[in-house]
Structures are given as C-alpha cells and as structure tokens.
Image: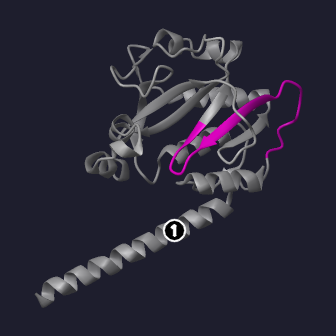
Amino acid sequence: MKRVRRVLRRLSVGLSLLVLLLALAAGLGAIVPQPLFASREAAGEGTRRILVLSNPIHTDIAIPVDAESLARFPFLGEAGVPVGDVAARWILFGRGGRTFYLETPTWADLKPLPLLRGLTLDRAVLHVDVVGALAEPSPTVQGFDIEPAGYKRLLDMIAASFATRDGQVVPVPDVRYGQNDRFFEATGWFTALAGCNTWTARGLRAAGLRTGLWNPLPVSLTFSLTQFN
C-alpha cells in the first residue's frame, strides 16, 4: 500500500507540474506577439471586415456573405448551407476535433469519450454556419478591417483546410446542429495543444493581424488580438 501511495503521490505531483507548465506557456503565448513586429503592408482602399466570435472554449472566423466569398466557396450552397438566404450576412468557419465536435452540440451532450478524444488526438473537421446581422463590438464579437491581400490569404487558408476527395470537398453526412450549418472533413489532425483556437489564430495571422505566439484558449486569443492590433 505504501508503494501504491508513493506512485500516486508522484503522479499527482507530475500532473500538477504539467498543468502549471501549460498555464505558464499559455500565459507567455498570449503576451508574446506573432509576428514579433507589425506588418508593413501598405494600407489602401477596399478593406474588408471580418469578425472573430468566441465562447468559453471555441472561436470562429466570420467573413461577409458577398460575391467574393460565394465565388470562393461555391460548394457551401451545394452542400446545403443557406448562403443564398436574403437574411444571411456572415459565414462562420471553425475547426475542431471530429468526435467532440460532432457529438457535443450542447454542454448537456458532453460525454467522457468525446472529451477524451478532444484532449488527446482525433481527426479534424470544419464547421460552417451562416448567421444574420451581429452586434459589434460585444464580449463575444471582435471586428477587424483588413487589406484585400490579407483577406485573400485568409480565404486561401480556410479553403486549404477543407479535405478533398477526387477534387471535391467532403461533407460529413447526417450531422448538423441546425438548419443553417454543415460539417466538412478537414485536413490534418486535431489535438488540444494545436486545436480550434490555434487554427483561428493562424488564419488571422494570414489576414495580416497579430496574435499571441500560442493561443490554445479563446481568452488568450482575444486578449492578444486586443493588445497587438
């Protein structure tokens, strides 16, 4: 019994140290900007408005519903996302772990296995939703005006995140949260250390914004966006 207690005590200490190190890394990741210096990209006409939507664990990138976005993502309407609805104003993109994302539409649906997969390793999916007008600024919505070149890079990054088969994107069959959204297979793998919020941050950096060096949580990402832009 004494040996078991010693092992458990060492495990407890080790886990506590791991949590402390991760907390320190997340804190430093929020206050160290990436890129380190602000972009010298010339300002010009035609800036585009994008939004970052956040909740306690997840962030989405929102782009306007317009001719450019509809032309860049024609497959959304074909897959049943109502981008042509007259009330549609924003297309939301978010990346997440396949099991957790598909099986946890609300906190009431939380189960141990999807949570475990979300904290370890899983295939990735993209969630696309369409919404109407959004009030900004608000505690859950940040808006940014970006240059046309940055906007194009953002769209390229989002498009490259969709997995394809025979040149076509791959919708996830029979799973959606409501009438306006759809899931698609995504490229790569999902881990808690490189998850939904680090994907959002990568897209925002492609757009020409500065984020923290590492942003695993929405609170660290929104903080860094406020500080560095």
Residue 34 showing in the rendered view: no
Residue depicted at 75% across the width and 42% down the height = 137
Highlighted magenta segment, given as a residue range: 39-60
- Depth check: give the residue in front, 80 or 26: 80
Q: Residue furthest front?
A: 108
- Depth check: give the residue in front, 54 or 66: 54
**Amino acid on which disc 1 is placed:** Ala
Where disc 1 sits, the SS reads helix
Q: Quadrant of residue 62?
A: top right
Residue depicted at 45% across the width and 24% down the height = 178
Q: Quadrant of residue 28?
A: bottom right
Q: Is residue 66 above or below residue 205?
A: above
The residue tagged 1 is 23
Q: Position of residue 187 (x, y in %)?
A: 43, 32
Q: Dividing the image into 4 quarters, which one contains the N terminus? A: bottom left
Q: Position of residue 182 (x, y in %)?
A: 45, 23
For label 1, the crowd category at 10 Å Cα-Cα, with few meaning under 14, some 14 to 19 and many 20 or more, is few
Q: Quadrant of residue 27?
A: bottom right
43 left or right of 11? right
Residue depicted at 40% across the width and 25% down the height = 176
Q: Position of residue 226 (x, y in %)?
A: 74, 52
